[in-house]
Image: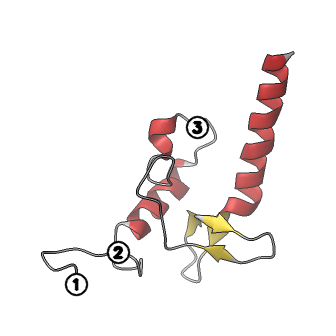
Amino acid sequence: SLATKASTLLQDITNGIQQHGIVQLSSGERIYAYEVDGMGKSLQDFDDANVPSLLSLPLLGWSGLDQKVYMATRERILSTKNRFYFEGDNLR
């Protein structure tokens, strides 16, 4: 049935994110990667300003969200640890 196929697809996507989309940084913290290439490399310090995005995961209602990993991801994206993060009047 369609419901079974959708449920299977959701589980496959969740498994893929858990296996490949959560990366461990040199600091030891685990975060969601924005992008992975399938060969061990990932884009970690980036997020899209639109939805869907890493920061919008709780709004999307994904049942597989790991709250601890999400909070570490959010903290990193919204900090100066993120080389793409800018703030202030002149975007320092």
- Residue at left 23%, top 74%? 87
Looking at the rendered structure, the secondary structure element under dot 1 is loop
Query: In the drawing, what numbered circle is on residue 29?
Result: none
Instruction: Quarter of the image for the C terminus: give it.
Output: bottom left
Residue positioned most to the left: 89
Q: How far apart are marks 3 and 2 (CA)?
A: 26 Å
> Does residue 64 lie above or below 80 as drawn?
above
Looking at the rendered structure, the secondary structure element under dot 3 is loop
Amino acid identity at mark 2: Tyr
The residue under label 2 is 85
Q: In this view, does 90 lie to the left or right of 36?
A: left
- Residue at left 71%, top 54%? 18
Q: Distance between the residues labelled 3 and 1?
A: 34 Å
Looking at the rendered structure, the secondary structure element under dot 2 is loop
The residue under label 3 is 62
Amino acid identity at mark 1: Arg
Q: Distance between the residues labelled 1 and 2?
A: 9 Å
- Name the quadrant containing residue 23: bottom right
Q: Residues within 10 Å of mark 1 (few under 14, many from 20)?
A: few
Q: Is residue 68 left or right of residue 14?
A: left
Q: Which of marks 3 and 2 is nearer the N terminus?
A: 3
- Residue at left 54%, top 81%? 27
Q: Mark 3 touching mark 2, by CB under 8 A?
A: no
The residue under label 1 is 92
**Viewer-proximal residue among 85 and 11:** 85
Image location of residue 29, percent across then percent down = 55, 71
Q: Nearer the viewer, mark 3 or mark 2?
A: 2
Amino acid identity at mark 3: Trp
Instruction: Quarter of the image for the N terminus: give it.
Output: top right
**Viewer-proximal residue among 88 and 61:** 88
